[in-house]
Amino acid sequence: MQYLAYGPRGTGPAPARPESRHEACDLGVPVRPSQGGPGEFACRLLRAREIASTGDRSRQAMVLHLAVLEHQVGRTTAAHVVKSAERASLPAAERRAQGRYPLLALHRLVGAVVSEIDRAVRALLAALPTGLPAALEQSGLHLIGATADERRRSVSGWLSGDGPPPPASAFWIVVAGAPPLELATRAVPGPSPGEWGRPACPWCGGTAWLSLLTDASGAQAGTARPCRRLVCGRCAGRWAYPLLACPACGERDPHRSRPYALSGQSWVRIDACEACHNYIKTFDLRADGAEGVVPFVDELVTGGLDRWAQERGLHRRGRLAS
Ligand SMILES: [Zn+2]
Ligand SMILES: [Zn+2]
């Protein structure tokens, strides 16, 4: 396995890339809807099926994810899921006008997510009778058996970020909670870069999980002026962020940001911060090979980058469960 640094390896900092001087640009046109934005579970499912059909290793990595997406696609049209998403998004316009963030009324989603947990656990146990990792099966059964109050506390902790549940429980809360939360985010227009340039998600307050590079028009064709969006690990919301600023600590010195890519995969890399030792995975949607890439799905088969980063003491933020 070979890794290529964009700058000289080992000694000395990587040279600043030309885009380092750009601030977050005005993203008037959204990223193509086919790239799996908030609520686009069907698009992710299609991509996951495509990847699963290409090889044994990818298929193995995708089995659980396929079952999750098949369940989530079905839940996006459930009446109470749609209704709770609408209720959560209602105050957003007023909050935005007042400069109050996050824009969503997250507490209005708690009831729907709590009731969705039971459905999610039963659906995946049925879909994967022998394929669920033991820790997930155990935590799913524990959540089903927990009191309503316990489940509400876990869901509230996930939504607020104040008391995040342990990873195995978080997996189920993410499976159950993503449809209502993402539908709520999808219903609310994002703020302009002038209104919001922070690393936290403006819709739900979550942490950035991925970073995307596109050209200024949102298309994939090559351009000299890339725009960067961060992608929320909780609601899949996407917002503009300065190209080389670290989403974890805000470091803006381009010499302290080190991008590394796996040989042969120019469309995905990690951006490591030498100031705080966190990294984020970046998808360059302008690059050759990026056609058809759906970042939330493709990132699951780029685990080699994560292992490489983690072996070097780098940490990843933004998601409690994949
Ligand atoms: Zn979010
Ligand atoms: Zn940093």
Image (spheres, helix red, strand yellow):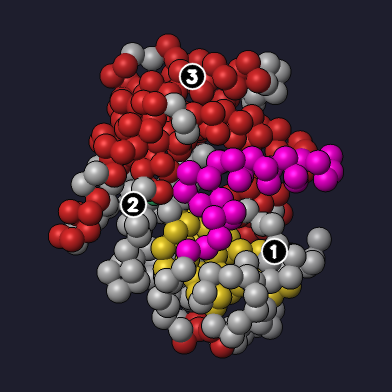
**Is residue 200 in the magenta section?**
no
In-front residue for pair 131/13: 131
User: What numbered label is drawn on residue 119?
Assistant: 3
Q: Marks 2 and 1, Cα distance to the nearest angstrom? A: 27 Å
As measured in the structure, the alpha-carbon distance from the residue carrying label 3 to the one carrying label 1 is 35 Å
Relative to 277, 63 lies left or right: right
Relative to the observer, which residue lies in front, 125 or 224? 224
Q: How many marks?
A: 3
Magenta highlight range: 30-57
Residue hosting label 2:
188
Is the residue marked by circle 1 packed among few (<14), some (14-19), or many (20+) residues within 10 Å? some
Circle 3 or circle 2, nearest the eye? 2
Residue 44 visible: yes
Residue 25 point in image, percent of width and height: 42, 77
Secondary structure under tag 3 reads: helix
Identify the amino acid type marked 1: Ala
Residue found at x 33% / y 52%:
188
Q: Position of residue 309 (x, y in %)?
A: 63, 59
Q: Secondary structure at mark 1?
A: loop
